Amino acid sequence: MLSNYVGEELFLKGVSIYLKKKLYANSVTKDLWEGIGAATGSLFTRLLSPSARLKLTSGKDIINFMDNWITKIGFPVLTVTETPTGIAVRQDRFLETGHAEPKDNETIWNVPLSIVTVDEDGQPVLNKEAVLGAREQTFELDTSKPFKLNAGTVGVYRVLYTPERLSKIAEETSKENGIFSLNDRVGLVHDAMALSKAGLAKLSSALTLIDGLKNEKEYLVWSGISESLSGLVSIWWEHPQIVDQLNALRRALFVPLVEKLGFEYLATDSVDTSLLRTCAISQAAAAKDEGVIKELQSRFAHFMKTGDDSRIPADLQRVIFTVAVRHGGKAEFDVAINIHDNAKTPTERIAAMQALGSAEDPELLKETLKFISTKARDQDVVYFFRGLSGNPKARRLLAQYFKEEYDTLYKRFESTFTLKSLVEVRNV
C-alpha cells in the first residue's frame, strides 16, 4: 500500500537508505519509515490533504502516516456516499460481526484512496493524491463517470458503496474494455461478500455484482466467485429453498464455462485455463447440474468396469470421486475405499478420503465414521472430517460423532495440533 502510494522507485530507494543505515545493526519499525521518508522528502507532505499535513512534522511524515497501521489493531471499512460535487468518505473499523461499537472504533487511519475514474476520452485516470486522514471527508469527483476507490486493490481496507453505485460498477465490470483491472475485480467480489456477511451491505447487491461478472475470463475472479457462493450455500445448508436458488445461480454462471472449456485437459492449456476448468466443473457438479453429473458418473463407471483410469484426469479426481459416491450406492463407496487402500499418489488417496464423506446414505456415512476410528491413519483423519463437513447429510452425524468420541480423539491427538484442525473443519 505504501509502495503504491509514494511510488515504487521512491519506496525502494527508501528501503535502500534504511538497509545501508542499519547495516549490521539492530532496528525498530520507525527506522524503515525514516528511510522511506528521507527518499520521498517534501513530495510526501505535498501529497497529503491540508488537514493531514498540519498534523505532521518535517522528517516524520511516513512515521506518522503509517503509525496507526502498525500499532493499532484492525483495518477500516470506507463508506462512500455521493454528493452534488463528488463523494463523501467515512472510515470506521471493520469487524466481521457488524458495526463497531464506539469503544472499538477510536482509530483514525491515514488512508490512500487511490481513486480510478475516466477522463473525457474514456481513458482510465488514477488519483493517488486523495488521502482520508479524518473520520469523514469529501472529495471532488465527477460521479456521472465510472469510479472506484482502492485501485488495484492494494490498500488494506474494504470499501462499502451504495447498492446503486455497486450496480453501476457491476455494469462497468461486464464491459470488454472496462476500466477495472483484474485486481480490481477480484477485490470487488471479496469486499462485496465480506461486507454482506458482516451485515453492512445487502447480499442482493453482492449477487448483482457477481451476476455482472458472468462474462469474466480470468480464473482468479472466478475463484473468488466460487469461494463466495460455496460459502453462502454452506451457511444456508439447512434452508433448501435458499440453497436451490443459490444453486440455480451457480449453474447459470458455471455451466456455460463447462460447455466452453470441456472436460479434457490439453498440454497446450495454460495453468489458469486448467484451474478454471476444474473450478467450473466442480461448481456445476456441486450445484447439481444433471449434464455435468452424468458425464462425471460415466467416467467413474468406466473405471469401475475396466480398471482404466485414463478418463479421470488428476485435476478432476476429487470431484469425480465425490460425485460417484454422493449419487451412487454401496458399489461406488466400496470402489472409493479400494482407491484409498491402493492409491497411486497421495492426491488420489486424499480425493478418495473426502469422497467417502460425501455419501448421502446414513449407513454408508456410519461406515465412514467407523473407518476413521479403526483404519484411518492419524494424519488422514482431517481429510475425512473435511469431506463429512462439506456434506449437508453428514454434518449433524459428524457433530454427534465428535461429541461421543471426544475423549478418544483427544487421547489420539493430544501430542499434535490435529485436534485443533478437526474442530476448525467441523465448524466450516
Image: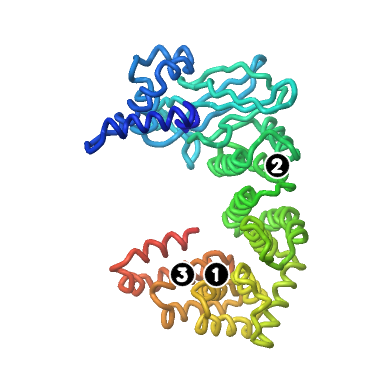
Image coordinates for residue 357, horizontal then vertical, percent: 54, 72
Between the C-alphas of marks 2 and 1, the distance is: 32 Å
Helix, strand or loop status at disc 2: helix
Name the image quarter holding residue 62: top left
Helix, strand or loop status at disc 1: loop
Quick check: marks 2 and 1 in contact, CB under 8 Å? no
Quick check: marks 3 and 1 in contact, CB under 8 Å? no
Image coordinates for residue 372, horizontal then vertical, percent: 44, 77
Three-letter residue code for mark 2: Thr
The residue closer to the viewer here, 404 or 250, is: 250
Residue position for label 2? 208
The answer to which of marks 2 and 3 sits earlier in the sequence is: 2
Three-letter residue code for mark 1: Ala
Residue position for label 3? 400
Relative to 411, 402 lies left or right: right
Q: Residue at x 48, y 42 (%)?
A: 96
Between the C-alphas of marks 2 and 3, the distance is: 38 Å
Q: Nearer the viewer, mark 2 or mark 3?
A: 2
